[in-house]
Structure formats: C-alpha cells, structure tokens
Amino acid sequence: MLAAIEEDALRPKPIKLTNFLRFGETAQTVDLSSLNVVIDANGSGKVSGWV
C-alpha cells in the first residue's frame, strides 16, 4: 500500500546558491515553483529551447 503524499511535498522548494557558476559570494535565492521538467527517451522529439 502506498503512503499518502502531501501535494506540497511534490512542489520544488526555493534554493540558495553561493559561489556557483555566475552566482557570487552573496547568496541568491532561485525560485523553482514554476519549473517544468520533460523526461523522455533520447531522440523522442524533446526541444531544449523551451522557455
């Protein structure tokens, strides 16, 4: 039997980045609430240019 999963548990949480790629020493918060993820096999027609 699968345990009930709260809907909020499936939503991405904001993350803080420091000293990563273009993020400097000051922590920057990145909101992931509008993140969309497409998972499918290679060569199946996904496009990396989606905005």
Image (tube, helix red, strand yellow):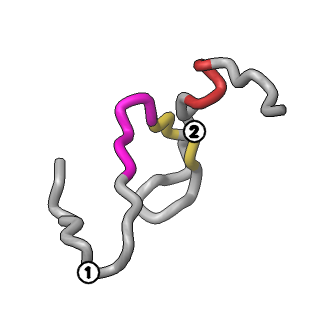
Residue found 43% across the figure and 29% down from its top: 33
Could you tell me the amino acid type at mark 1?
Answer: Gly
Mark 2, Cα crowd under 10 Å, few <14 / some 14-19 / many 20+, is few
Answer left or right for 48 relative to 37: left
Residue found 46% across the figure and 65% down from its top: 21
- Spot occupied by residue 49 in the image (x, y as percentages of width and height): 16, 61
Residue found 38% across the figure and 74% down from its top: 41
Instruction: Give 4 or 32, whichever is nearer the viewer.
Output: 4
Number of numbered discs: 2
- Spot occupied by residue 38 in the image (x, y as percentages of width and height): 35, 55
Which quarter of the rendered picture does the N terminus lie within?
top right
- Spot occupied by residue 40 in the image (x, y as percentages of width and height): 37, 66
* Position of 45 relative to 38 (above/below): below
- Spot occupied by residue 3 in the image (x, y as percentages of width and height): 81, 27
Q: Secondary structure at mark 2?
A: strand
* Magenta span: chief secondary structure: loop
Q: Nearer the viewer, mark 2 or mark 1?
A: 1
- Whichever of labels 2 and 1 marks the residue nearer the N terminus, that label is 2
Instruction: Give 43 or 11, whichever is nearer the viewer.
Output: 43
**Residue matched to label 2:** 15
Query: What is the magenta range?
Result: 32-37
Q: Identify the image quadrant of residue 15.
A: top right
Residue 5: image tag: none
**Residue matched to label 1:** 43
